[in-house]
Image (cartoon, rainbow, N blue to C red):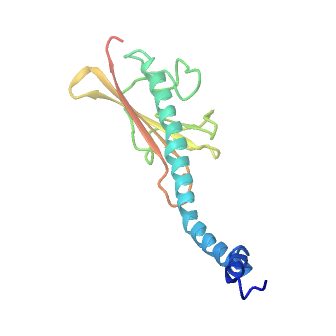
Amino acid sequence: MTSERRPHLVERHRSAAGFSILETVFALAILMVVALGLLPLGVIATTNTENQGHLMARATEYSQDKMEQLLSLKFGDLSSDTRVFPASNSGGTGLAVGGSADPNAPAAKYVDYLDIDGTLLTSTGTTAPPTWFYKRVWTVEFVGSITTLKQVTVTTVVKNAVGGKVRPPQATVASIKTDPF
């Protein structure tokens, strides 16, 4: 029997031969183009996860930590220094009305700095230590004309965001403190 008498055997043999090297290279080239097209999405996802997931969560946590420290002071405390841990009884502003909620314009004694691990750094005035990564600023003000209510606002900003031209994460928390507590 020759293949002329059985053409279906020749066709079956050709279809079982598989892909040629040229077809394989072409398929891999298409796959590489698709993968390279998706690569920027991975970079964007990683950047957003780091900035909005990790750094924003840490900034919020550090704002809450400062808020708890300030709210633990007595309403009339005007001298405790919360820029050190544990807070000292003198040398600071306690819950004195003042400060700034703007990280770009911190008020003396109403600002402190943390390193990348969240460890409190010593600083003088509004001069930032070179190793700072988180800056916390706070303000204390009376609520309207009511002198028995103080609003405390704490803002924490991250020095550098991941991804270059992205605005660094910033978190702000606020609370009310009442006299006599």
In terms of depth relative to the viewer, which is nearer, 50 or 31?
31
Residue under the point 52% across and 58% down: 44
In terms of depth relative to the viewer, which is nearer, 82 or 44?
44
Relative vertical location of residue 81 with respect to residue 42 in this rendering, above or below: above
Residue under the point 63% across and 41% down: 116
In terms of depth relative to the viewer, which is nearer, 111 or 67?
67
Residue under the point 37% across and 32% down: 98
Q: Work out which residue is located at the far right of the displayed protein and give it.
A: 1
Quarter of the picture holding the C terminus: top left
Quarter of the picture holding the N terminus: bottom right
Left/right of residue 84 with respect to residue 71 in the rendered view: right
Left/right of residue 30 with respect to residue 17 in the rendered view: left
Relative vertical location of residue 121 with respect to residue 25 in this rendering, above or below: above
Does the rendering let one see residue 109? no
Count of labels shown? Answer: 0
Residue under the point 40% across and 23% down: 95
Q: Work out which residue is located at the far left of the displayed protein and give it.
A: 145
In terms of depth relative to the viewer, which is nearer, 9 or 15?
9
Does the rendering let one see residue 125? yes
Residue 66, percent from left and from top: 48, 28
